[in-house]
Amino acid sequence: MLIPSRPMDRRTLLRGVGVSLGLPWLEGMSGMTSWAQDSVPKAPNRMAFLYVPNGKNMADWTPKTPSSLTPAFDSAAKGFELSPILEPLAPVQDKLLVVSGLTADGARAYADGGGDHARALSAFLTGARPLKTDGVNIRNGVSVDQVAASRVGNQTRLASLEIGTEAGAMAGNCDSGYSCVYSSTMSWRSATQPLPKEVNPRIVFDRLFGSSNDSPRVERDARRKSILDFVREDSKSLTGRLAANDQRKLDEYFSSIRDIELRIERSEKLPPVKVPEYSVPQSIPAVYEEHIRMMADLMVLAFQADVTRVITFVLANEGSNKSYSFIDVPEGHHDLSHHGGDGSKQSKLRQINIFHTKQLAYFLTKLQSIQEGPGTLLDHSMIAYGSGIHDGNAHNHEDLPILVAGGGSGTLKTGRHMVFPKETPISNLWLSLLDRMEVDLEKLGDSQGHLPDLI
């Protein structure tokens, strides 16, 4: 007869001096031994929003199939054809939902004139039209991530996490009379309260795993050597309660944390390099790809340890003119986005777009590699990726390049390309994702309802 053991709390923490680590999902949390799967508790659902600037080279983004409006196409059809920009996502194609036809109306100019980049980022998750001002009287809407954070954030150590790779000013004129905050901030707690993103992996790491009574950093670093040194003794108390499979998972989890620590320490010792029109803050990896992937690893750890279930990640500020010389594209991204139909410039844009998709693939495959109960972290997540601009040359905001990855804890049918009618608000998608976080909201920004047939 199988006798249940006392289940471990999902929020069990290993504590050290000034740090605390949440546990990953373990079979022992079900209260049964590892061969009893029927009672494994339901894993939490998570959501993350990843933003890339300046739109896409849409001819190389949009899958060729289906050609009809959803739900007219055969939903039982076998997958869809990956476009050149989406090709790096082939290993997780069955976990993708590419969504075409969505519009960010709040990003359009109307009577406000220039400022499409500022509006694109600030309207992306809010569905609102930001007030055109470069003063202190900024006004936008509440973003979908913060709606979720306000409802489910009390279940985790951090209600939400806002990160990026490019620092941005919170004041001043950055885009045709719009405050810099609009083009560098995606998350808004209220109409007047933007949440600045953190770009330093070290600070993000400390925020995820440091305690509220941390001593000053110099003193803490001098005495800690490694976070794992302080939690090792605490972890021994779990050894007798863990099955072999859970012990392996815990070892892998500790190894991942230690690996990130070492990478952060190495990056801080490297001399900074000069990057055209991009200032690298001290202690941030000089290599852009390493910076992105370090942040991706931290997001995975945050979800794995259930430190937070809501994350926003701005891979580069809207309107960014970052050079991509490391992939043989020395020109600025924003400059190239104004391609004017020049085939050479469009080809270079495609290279930049593919680079960004490769980073997304890294993140998704890492989530997919981590088992969590009967599924994976990716199965229990919803990762939205895209831009608030369709084509950088036209500065238009309809038919946005958007995809959602992950199973949403069984609430999303993936492996499809869905084409919605023109002018469908992107906020309809956000409402639909909130439903899957068990957050009931009648309206977000300019939303008109929920998207049908996502499952």
Image: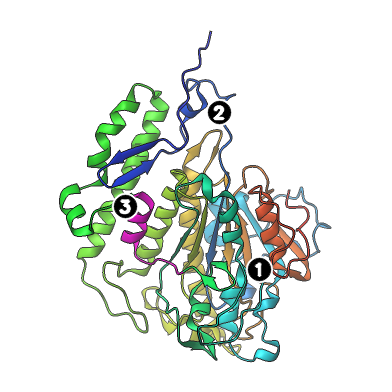
Residue, far right: 72
- What is the residue that sits farthest to the left in this orientation? 222
Q: Earlier in the sequence, mark 1 or mark 2?
A: 2
Tell me, yes or no, whether the highlighted magenta stretch contains residue 199.
yes
Assign a secondary structure to mark 2.
Answer: loop
Q: Residue at x 81, y 64 (%)?
A: 68
What is the x, y in percent for residue 56?
Answer: 58, 75
Cα gap from disc 1 to disc 2, whole angstroms: 39 Å
Q: Would you say residue 258 is visible in this rendering? A: yes
Q: Earlier in the sequence, mark 3 or mark 1?
A: 1
Q: CA distance from mark 3 to mark 2?
A: 29 Å
Q: Where does the magenta region start and end?
A: 196-210
Read off the residue under disc 1: 62
Q: Residue at x 48, y 73 (%)?
A: 352
* Pointer 3 local density, CA inside 10 Å: few below 14, some 14–19, many at least 20: some
Please give the residue where the numbered disc 3 appears in the rendered image. Answer: 260
